[in-house]
Amino acid sequence: MSNDKVSSRRRFFVRAGAALAVPLAAAGAGAAQAAVADDAASLGARLAAHDDLAAIRSLRQTFARAIGDGGGEGLGDLFVDRRAAAAAAAGFAGVRRLAPADFGEHDRVEIAADGRTARAEAHCTVETETALDADGTLAEMARAQGEGFVRRAGRRVLVIDYVRQGETWKIASAAFAA
Amino acid sequence: MAIQYPREQMHRIAYTALTGSQISERLRAAAAGPASASERSDVFAGQRIRILTDGGPELRYTFESASRLSVAENGAAAVGAGYGALTLDHVAFFSHLVPGTQRGYHVVIDRDTSLATVFEVWFSGYEDNREVQRQAHFGYVERPGEPAPAARHRLTNRVEGKGYYWKQDTGAETLELYPSTIYSNFVELSRFGGELSFCAPSDYIQVDDETYIYQRTECEFSGTQTVYVFDVNRVEQVGARLGFNERDELEYYVFRGQGEWLGQLAHFERFGDLGNPEPDPNADPPAKGFRRVYRPMSTFQTFTREEFDRIAAEREPQVFPAGPGSGMSGNKQQVSDYLVGKAMTMRYDNGPAIEYRFDAIQSLSWRKEGQRGWTEARYEAWESAPDLVMFGHLLAGEPDHDCHMVVADFEHGLASCLHGTMGTPYIGNETAVENLFGVIETEGMTPPKYRRHQYTDELVGKALTWNYSTETGLTSMHLYSTPHSLSWIIFGNDGAGGMEWSGPAAYVKIREGIYLGYWLEEACNGTLGTILINMNTMHDCGAGYSGGANGIRLTAVGAHSRHAGQFDVRRFFQITA
């Protein structure tokens, strides 16, 4: 399956009257209730909001997998352009795994009122691998057996800005929160 | 009969770079098959067997007698060869070369299960032609009318941590220690006098719960291969040795041996990890004959003594610099101010008397007794135990870029020094060392007249892990393999023992559970490692002293330790005559 396009079902999309700020774990019901409350909207609006959140979540998951696979070519189609993809690849150099933390309980997605941009904050467990900065015999031997890396794991908040391009959400930028 | 110590130990022998034609010439004698001190087994005589391997050769054998066979490889025409077979209970081993080639096979067959391991071996497969190359193929002996078995012999970590004394029917005696899953450590008791241990890339294969196959190739040395199947209950082995010795003579024989179990070191893999993971279906298979080999001399930048003198004159020595350095100081002990403000003389029985003034926590002044002027030096000191301090510094102006690593025991008034110097008859920037023993002379203390720190074998056979940095995780294991050598093993990410190397060493007892040790990375990276091992705190302190293109370097070492076990080997190094 190609990961290069994550589309929403536009035929059901009706722009929400206000930004959606919802826990991702409760994306379906929570988003729909928010949309309904603000806009007294139709079933179409609720489904559109649901689809946008699903598309954004899927894009984030694809991005996390691509980072875990070493970034590179896998990132290109997820971003609005090559420059953005390259910037993200550089920013995540050394990251070997991005896994959701706390079952997404603290994650948030905000879709702008005009429905054209969105921002997601996802709490992650991050595993990094960097080359061992040492030059002695032990380090040399570790490298000779295919290792010689420092591996760390920690918690970070991944912030992704999205832009809608036609029917498809794309990533404008991705970085860890400071 | 006197022990025949070699003129040079294995790591100093300049083994001949044999050409392909020289190897072919020497292998002609092997057409008759391997020699054997024991009577060869006739277990295969008169039989025909077909061995099928997974991704490897199909071999059809016709055994005409106990010493002659013909083999057809992959359906090609059969060729005749001499062979030798030996059995070990239900397992049969045989070995032969293919006449007219530089190739051959060592075959292990479990006669109960019909499973087979075939070691395909060949020469001239690496830039050093004499280094035996090998590929283990797993398969089975076809049994007509029966389906192919699903099981296979397999790589294992079940041998990891074991150690044995072996005596072959040739009379050759060795200690063979397996602290790794890809390397092993061997002490040639009879061939080389047993002073030092050496390391070689190795394979470990499980036949069944009590039967294993071991293979090592003495890469970076003679390139000789030793392969055997052994029974861990009976402690018996049958196998073969193939290669060219230091006189470039072909050694090709099958052997039978008996041994003694020497101990078992700890495993550091997770529970349930048996060292035989399924291969990654997405990864490219390794090239035929692939093995991880540590080749330190291929990366060590060597200089003549004259060249290194120029380098050392032009480049400021690095003495306890900040930064990662060798990566071995992340868990170093806190730098001690114990000596600050003190003055003393270290009077060595077999060396100079050095007068000291410790001016600050990292600054001292020294002079040899009788000299007028003082020389300032940067130093570091660590207090390993109450009133027991190790400190080190360079001796600027001395002829050999000298270094002193001193253990000063103020409770007993004793001082021991590892006097490092730069340059050996072999390499200009390789370190050498001598142990100096003596006393501390300082105000308010009367040192002993006769008592001194002494060499000890209490560490010999022990294995300790050393974690040099909590931050980076850099960890190795020391195996104090003989009274005169130390081996170090690098762990893999899964906790399995990995790359291993060894160097000359010595151990001095300082206090109960506290030892001063050194190792020399001879024909390796040239470094002198000095450590004060405190088995009460399970923490060490010390320094590494080395020389390279950047000049002289003296860097701190410090690590947290764990006990990994002990081999019962001290008895092999006692003077018995």
Image (spheres, grey):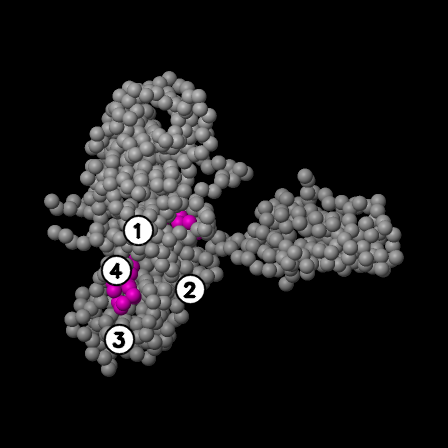
- Asked if the residues shown at circle 1 and circle 2 are in contact, with their CB atoms under 8 angstroms apart, the answer is no
Task: Measure the alpha-carbon separation of dots 2 and 3.
Answer: 26 Å
Magenta-colored span: B495-521
**Helix, strand or loop under label 3:** loop
Residue B263, label in figure: 1
First reached walking from the N terminus: tag 1 or tag 2:
1
First reached walking from the N terminus: tag 3 or tag 1:
1
First reached walking from the N terminus: tag 2 or tag 4:
2
Residue B552 image-quadrant placement? bottom left
First reached walking from the N terminus: tag 3 or tag 4:
3
Counting other residues with Cα less than 10 Å from the Cα at mark 2, is it few (<14), some (14-19), or many (20 or more)? Answer: many
Q: Is residue B294 left or right of residue B421?
A: right
Nearer the observer, B203 or B124: B203
Q: Residue at x 30, y 79 (%)?
A: B342
First reached walking from the N terminus: tag 4 or tag 1:
1
Task: Measure the alpha-carbon separation of dots 1 and 2.
Answer: 30 Å
Residue B458, label in figure: 4
Q: Position of residue B465 (x, y in %)?
A: 37, 57
Residue B411, label in figure: 3
Subunit ID for the residue under disc 3: B
Nearer the observer, B300 or A174: A174
Subunit ID for the residue under disc 4: B
Task: Measure the alpha-carbon separation of dots 4 and 1.
Answer: 16 Å
Q: Quadrant of the N terminus of chain B?
A: top left
Q: Which residue is mark 2?
A: B331
Whether marks 3 and 1 lie on the same chain? yes
First reached walking from the N terminus: tag 2 or tag 3:
2
